[in-house]
Amino acid sequence: MQELTLNCVYANQARLELSNVGQPFCHDNAFADGAVPMDEKFLFYIGTMNPLHLWIIQFSIIIGTATLLSFVLREIRQPKVIAEVLSGIVLGPTICGELRVHSISAFNSQSRPYLALTADIGLRLFFFLFGLQIEPSVVKKNLRVSGIIALAGMIIPFVTGAGLSVLLYEQFMNENIRLTYFMFFSGVAFSVTAFPVMCRILTEFKLLNTTVGAAVISAGLSNDVIGWILLALSVAMLKADSGSEAMYMILSCAIWTLILLFPVKLLLRMLATSTGSIDNGPSVLFMTIAVLIAFSSALVTNISGVHGIFGAFLMGLIIPREGNLGTSMLEKLEDMVEIIFLPFYFALLGMSTNLGFLNDGITWVYTILIIFAAFVSKFGSCAIAAKYTADFSWRESGAIGSFMSCKGLVELIVLDVGLSPGILTPRVYAMFVLEALVLTYITTPLAIRLYPPEIHKGIVFGSTTFRNVTSDDSHGSGTLRNTTVVSKRRITVVLDKVEHLPAVMAFTQLFRSRSSSTPYRSMQKRVAPSIEALRLIEISERACAVMKSPDTLLKTDHLLAILKMFGRLHAIPITTAIDIATYDSHADSVIDYAYNRGSDLIVLPWLLLPANISHRQTVPNESFLPLAHDGAGKAAAANVTVNLSARIHPRFLQSIFEHARADVALFLDRNIENSAQGNFNLHLFLPFFGGPDDRLALDFVAQLCENDEISATVVRFIRKSQNETISMTQTTELNHGSAVENPESDTADVMAWKYHTSRSASLSMSSDSSFSHIAMKECITTLPLHAAVREAHIIKQPSTRLLIVVGRTKHLQVNMDSKDLSDLIAEHGDLDEEVKKTIGDIAAAFVAANSGDGVLVLQKAGFYLD
């Protein structure tokens, strides 16, 4: 009510001053009365007669200034909140006031009520969202360890702030404010942590799935919950004239808290159930009632003597968490609050800060002392607690201390709450604001320095327990990798999009048999491979994304549930894991996971969708088109290409090909319809040109043929020039993009081919051998790619699915000709350069020629082709 009365007073004062500025306006159009845009007369007019126009001008100036500053600060990896506060400082008395443009700006004292109203609404919504961010499962996990870190980070800074406040009180404060109130408030300001800012930094630097990230999130949440309770107590004590009145305020707030926690929470759960909000996301009715109760709760706590933000925070806490309802509400409201409301609040906060008060030596001495004491007390207490209670290394403990010492918007809100009732003088307020900005600024560079990426320890996937980490010597499967012919027994399949699920299913079917009792030949000698499905979930910089629990997602993710059921129905053992990270870090997540789990092979599915490969000579095989039906599929056959998802997904695949420490397979399943018809007779076609990738493909084909219902044709293509005949034993190896004849590779190719052909010949009559299902031959030709494509169409039978298996080797080999590929693409249609770069030229030839029902592209570890 006090704020509303103040707004009315400001509005009436503005109208009175307007009447004194020349001739009063008599029209709705200010320009009709001779006003000039942005002069004093114009701004008075729009502030009284048309406040919406003033609000729009203020919004544009604030957002524009904050955005420009954020672009600059982003280059030095600083959070957006610093830019928002600095925009207010620029527009406030510190800069605009000194330049004497404040009186003619859109932020004069008469226009502040509209700015303050928007800021107050945003502040209450922010605390409502902050309550929604509190995930009990995150706080409960490792509660003992994170609780000790949080308590140490509260008690030591609180005592330090209270002790330093005695010196500040004697030097800068007046006697109207009690010392005990100032001590209590200073302790709260020293002890809080900027959890929202901390979440953004953790997300940006890919620390969410590290031990440090898990510890910081748990401890930061606990720290801030305690901090807001202490802030509410300090405000209540300040507003009370006596101890009994303060007790009355605290009891009133406690009673309202109990009302919210029990009857209101029960009614909200009943409403969420009846409206289907738990199962289907928050309904409009549920959202309306929840926001209405949030503002009502803020009003009740404000009337009771405690700040209104506490009531909104309590409302956020009691929202049901079943079915990720709280996270869903956060997603719906967070953007609006952060884009519109919070910038107003921080701009207003910056305008209330006059750094001109820091104008003498003693003030700067105490300012530096505040910064030093706040940092050392918070950093030291949290780092020592992490070191001796959770066995973190000193670097990890230092990183935890760095993140916990981040102040950001949380301390700024605390300072604003203290400025309004007069706990802080403008000078002391400016000193504390500078301290908050400095500690927020140093968080990122200090954390990077203490905890560089090369020493990150990740949490075991599917768990947020930061004691359960992947150790540096957990790559036990390194013994599985050697240079001999070894079957792939531990396979990581990546699942990042729903459209890739059919391809993943099609690949896993390669390791099953219709006869589940004897899925493989010679089970005494052969062991079925272990398939691990890694689900990738993209995380944004929003706080709602940070609060997603990996354990909960692992149990509730629809794609993983479908895949696990598919595995059970087909007797295929599939284990699942989940990784939540930014899209840019997905490739690193896949590589690290495969390495830590000791995977022999990383499988990447990719769905090729219709778009714009223009086929000039259509091969009669319309099964190329996935999801094509009847006439639509035939019409699309004349215009086919790859949906590149704005070319982002190919770069993800290329990054894995380039940096993976295990073998990589890219699976292009292009005939989903046939695979769903129960026709599982599968025939593999491998065009063997030589090189490490082709040798890997040859070994993998032999492994797949262990399955009863898979057969294969392997053709070794040898290019003959027009002037000379190349020896049948001449092959080359392409190493890191260099085209040279490598005698060592020649020998490896010859040995691999002789081994498989001899085994195929000697054991072709044995039903106990995978080679009994492999037909091998050689072909000498001047156009090997044309011959390979022609051979694929000859092999293709209507009763079987044809999967083409190729190495990712490019056309720089002596055994191939670049003109061969260009002519082939020219005959069948254009192919995007990103596609050719991703899958390699041999696979590109089959894709362009529309051959087979799918393509499996393999690359040997350590032989990336740029």
Image (cartoon, grey):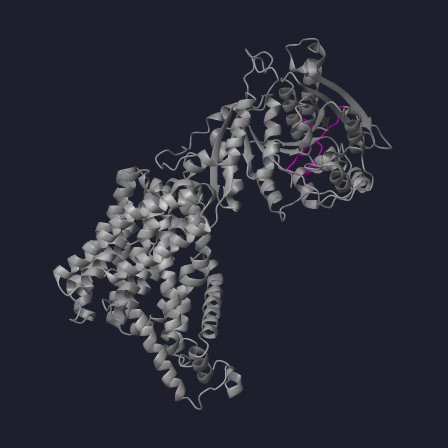
Foreground residue, 400 or 92?
92
Residue visible at 61% across and 18% down? Answer: 513
- The image quadrant that residue 615 belongs to is top right
Image height of 702 relative to 793, above or below: above
Image coords of residue 91 (percent x, y) = 41, 73
Image: 241 above or below 778 = below
Front residue (pair 471, 705): 705
Judged from this view, the residue extending furthest toward the bottom is 23
* Residue 806 falls in image quadrant: top right
Horizontal side of residue 559 vs 114, given as left or right: right
Span highlighted in magenta in the image: 729-744
Residue 675 position, x and y percent, is 66, 28
Q: Quadrant of the N terminus?
A: bottom left
The residue lying toward the viewer, choosing from 712 and 679, is 679
User: Looking at the rendering, which quadrant does residue 602 occupy?
Assistant: top right
Furthest residue toward right: 723
Q: Is residue 90 visible?
A: yes
419 is higher (above) or lower (below) than 651? below
Q: Nearer the viewer, residue 441 or 142?
A: 142
- Position in image of residue 535 (x %, y %): 51, 36
